[in-house]
Amino acid sequence: MVHEEKFFVWQDFDKSLRERDKCIQIAFDYTYAGTTKRVYMKSVDWKKEDPFAKYHWFVGDNNSRNLRVLKDDSSQCGISINGYNFVETSPYYCAREQDLDKFVAVVVEFSGEEEIGRMAISPTRVKRPTENRNDLLIFEERQEKFCKEKLNGNKYRILSYNVLAHLYNKTSLTKNEQKDQYYSYCPKEFQFDTYRYPLLLKEIHGYNADILFLQEVDVRLQRRFLIPFLKLKGYTSIFNCKENQVNEGLIIAIRDDRLYEDGNHTAKLSGLLNKRSNSDIMEFLKNKSESYEVISSRPSIIQIVHLRSVDDPNVQILAANTHLHYDPLFEDVKHLQAVLCVRYINDIIRQIKKSQKNCKIEVIFAGDFNFVPTSRAAKVLRNDLDLINNKEENIKREENNKNSTKTLVEQQQFSFFLLINWFFWTLFGNLFGANWLPKPLEDNNIEKIKVPFKFQCATGFPPYTNFTRAEGFTKDAFVGCLDYIWTFPETKVLKVIPFPEHNLVTKYGAIPSRIAPSDHLPIICEIYIEGKNESNLT
């Protein structure tokens, strides 16, 4: 990890206090730690660690090497450190208001060892991530108002979130070099994974969702921190890495007390092209060598997990997660990738129904689709559902964005700018030897490529789920809706969780920022899924 801090570590406390070469690495430095804001976890390989080890956390006013760790029967945990106060015994620690400006120490007791095993002390003091005591992280009010309580019965809270993989942050660049990169409005110190990871840990579990769909999850984040942390919070997580040696991927996580996994499937989207059922796609790509090159080489995958309800085994859910190609010049690629995903979902449903002929399977298809609501890709998923005249979706959109009037105007202006570009390059592109307009938009044949069923967007179509356009930083900037949770039209949507206040999104120009760990906002809805018994009664 870039600039990862190491706690000072001593061993053999009963003999002498001396620093050993081998350190226990702690996930995050404490420079921007804060008052119930961040979660701290030790950086270890959880697959190899001692599952019965105990982690005792302390806070104190110094990190001198003269500190002594002793067994102490009068202490709540049986251990004391001179000058330090015991906080709790837990695999992780979340800083409190009273811990500001203090050092943090962790003492590890390994199973089967009589002596104290390891001790580590933070090299810096605890500080808050926000500028002022009463400032909020972007997700706190949203969680407190709308997600404080967990759901039960046949109600399910669904979340989809692109958490921003660290590999796309050019944190090794100088300040001048960073000006030409993404997120140049965000100071580098707030882009480091050492800063963002703790915020993500706190944010993700705080929504109390039943099913989590996560995209752009770093291999390191999921292996060392996210999956073990979610396990402690009562979730089972399934991670699948993208293809082509890309070190990020997808996670579907489920609450253990509500759902359990009954099988999972993963497919590289380019690998689905050669299936007989997708021959129409290959036919379409015959004369589109550039698009074929892109779609056949992208690392995009689809992740599917078959879920059953713990309380009602008749409730079966096929949870599908994906992250489609990003390039706006290849809208046809996104369209075809979306079709490949839905057809693969249909294949899995058919497999399940071979052994369960009369079963009812709900589909929740979520992710970062990288297309806007008015795109043809969105249209094909809705199977020609009219976006503008759909009253339900308009209501959801209004509820989601009561305070986003300014953003709507900005987005309309931005769309008008794109429209002018479209006409310019359509009329004069050949003169300049340019081809700005994506070829698929010139070809209506792509609309003939259909999906086997239609969806509704359970979260509606807000003005944006991705916001990277800050004042004075317009290069490669974008504001728009790219993230969706698709369900069957008959699935009852109970609630769409409103977005954070727009002024929080733009407080530091755009996101990510000091108070927001990703360039995307998580989309969240609550749905109702009928069990078989209920269906028989109606």
Image (tube, grey):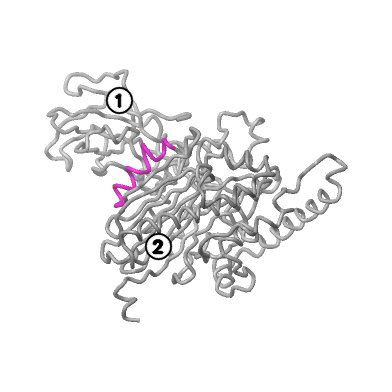
From the viewer's perspective, tell me whether residue 75 is left or right of residue 487: left
Q: In the picture shown, does residue 91 fall above or below 484?
A: above
**Residue 113 lies within the magenta run:** no
Query: Which of the two residues, 248 or 306, is positioned nearer the viewer here?
Result: 306
In percent of the image, x 45 and y 49: which residue is there? 214
The x and y percentages for residue 26 are 36, 32
Q: Which element carries disc 1, helix, strand or loop? A: strand
The x and y percentages for residue 397 are 57, 67
Q: Quadrant of the C terminus?
A: bottom left
Q: Is residue 372 visible?
A: yes
Q: What separation in Å lies between label 2 and label 1 (alpha carbons)?
A: 42 Å
Query: Which of the two residues, 522 or 108, is positioned nearer the viewer here?
Result: 522
Q: Which span of residues is magenta-colored?
A: 219-235
Q: In the picture shown, does residue 244 fall above or below 394?
A: above
Q: Magenta stretch mostly in which secondary structure?
A: helix
In the rendered image, which residue does mark 1 sit on? 9
Residue type, mark 1 in image: Val
In the rendered image, which residue does mark 2 sit on? 157
Query: Which of the two residues, 226 or 404, is positioned nearer the viewer here?
Result: 226
**Residue mark closest to the camera, 2 vs 1:** 2
- The image quarter containing residue 449 is bottom right
> Which mark is first along the chain, 1 or 2?
1
From the viewer's perspective, tell me whether residue 136 is left or right of residue 50: right
Determine whether label 2 and label 1 are within 8 Å by CB.
no
